[in-house]
Image: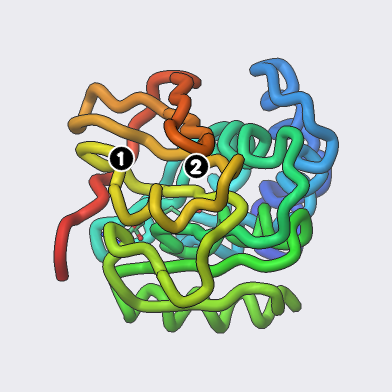
Amino acid sequence: MIEPQGGIQGIGMTSKRTRDRLVQRLREQGIRSEDVLNQIRNVPRHLFVDEALASRAYEDTALPIGLGQTISQPYVVARMTEALLDGFEGETVLEIGTGCGYQTAVLAPLVKKIYTVERIPELLRKTRQRLRDLDIYNVQFRPGDGWEGWRKYGPYDAIIVAAAASEIPEKLLQQLAPDGRMIIPVGPPGRQDLAMVIKKNDHCEQVSLEPVSFVPLVKGK
Ligand code: SAH
C-alpha cells in the first residue's frame, strides 16, 4: 500500500516546507516581526485541530475545533501578537478566549507570563493538557467570563482578546496597567474591527488596525 501524504508526524502537509510556505505568505501580507514569524513556523498547529483537519492546519484559515468554536486564522494571530509586542517592555499578559490555545502557544515564549480565561471548561481542560505536552509552563488558566477579566493578578501589562466584544469591556480597561495596551476585536458579527487601545493616565487612545471576523465574546455564563 502507498502511504498517503499528510501524516501528522511532520511529513507531507505538516512538513517544514508547508510551514515555510505559510510563513512566506504572512510575510507577503505584511507581518514583519521575526519573533512572531518564527513562532508561527515552530508551533505545531496541526496538534490544535482534530486529526481529520490536520492536513489543513498550515493553510491560512480559521478551522472548527468543536463546541461551536474555531481556531483563529494564522494571519490574525500573527497580526495581533505583533501589535501586542510592538515596543512591549512588560511581563504579564491577560488573554481572553483561550479556545484551543494556539494564540497562547504562539505568544507564550515571547512574554514572561500569560493569564488566560475561557468560558467553556471542557475546552480549557484539553488545552491545559495540550500546552503541557508542548512544554509550555508560563500560562495560568481560568474557566470564567472574560467580560470580568481576572482581577487577582492584575493590572496586566497587556491584554489580548480572541472573541469579538460589542464594546470595550470596562473591567478589562480597569485591569490594564498605565501605558498598557489591549488588542481586541470590537463590533457586531460581520462588521468587526481589530482595535488597539492604549491606556494613558486620564484617557485611552484607540487605533483601528483592520476589519476582522471573530466568534462573539459571550456575555455571562
Ligand atoms: N485563541 C483561540 C481562538 C479562540 S475562539 C485560538 O488561538 O485559536 C474564541 C474563544 O473565546 C472560544 O473558545 C470561546 O469559547 C471563548 N469565549 C467566548 N466568550 C467568552 C467569554 N465571555 N469569556 C471567556 N471566553 C469566551
Q: Quadrant of residue 58?
A: top right
Residue 13 point in image, percent of width and height? 67, 47
Tell me whether circle 2 and circle 1 mark residues in contact (CB < 8 Å).
yes
Q: Residue at x 44, y 19 (%)?
A: 208
In the picture, which quadrant includes the C terminus? bottom left
Q: Taking the image as four quarters, which one is ligand 1 found in?
A: bottom left
Q: Is residue 213 left or right of residue 189?
A: right
Q: Earlier in the sequence, mark 2 or mark 1?
A: 1
Q: Residue at x 45, y 63 (%)?
A: 98
Residue 172 point in image, percent of width and height? 38, 53
Residue behind mark 1: 168
Residue 204 point in image, percent of width and height? 44, 31
Q: Nearer the viewer, residue 175 or 34?
A: 175
Q: Secondary structure at mark 2?
A: strand
Q: Residue at x 39, y 53 (%)?
A: 174
Q: Quadrant of residue 105?
A: bottom right
Residue 118 point in image, percent of width and height? 37, 68
Q: Secondary structure at mark 1?
A: loop
Residue behind mark 2: 182
Q: Neighbour class for label 2 at 10 Å: few (<14), some, many (≥20)?
A: many
Q: Nearer the viewer, residue 216 or 66?
A: 216
Amino acid residing under circle 2: Met
Residue 32 numbered mark, or none: none
Task: Kindly give the residue lying farthest to the front in the view shown.
Answer: 202
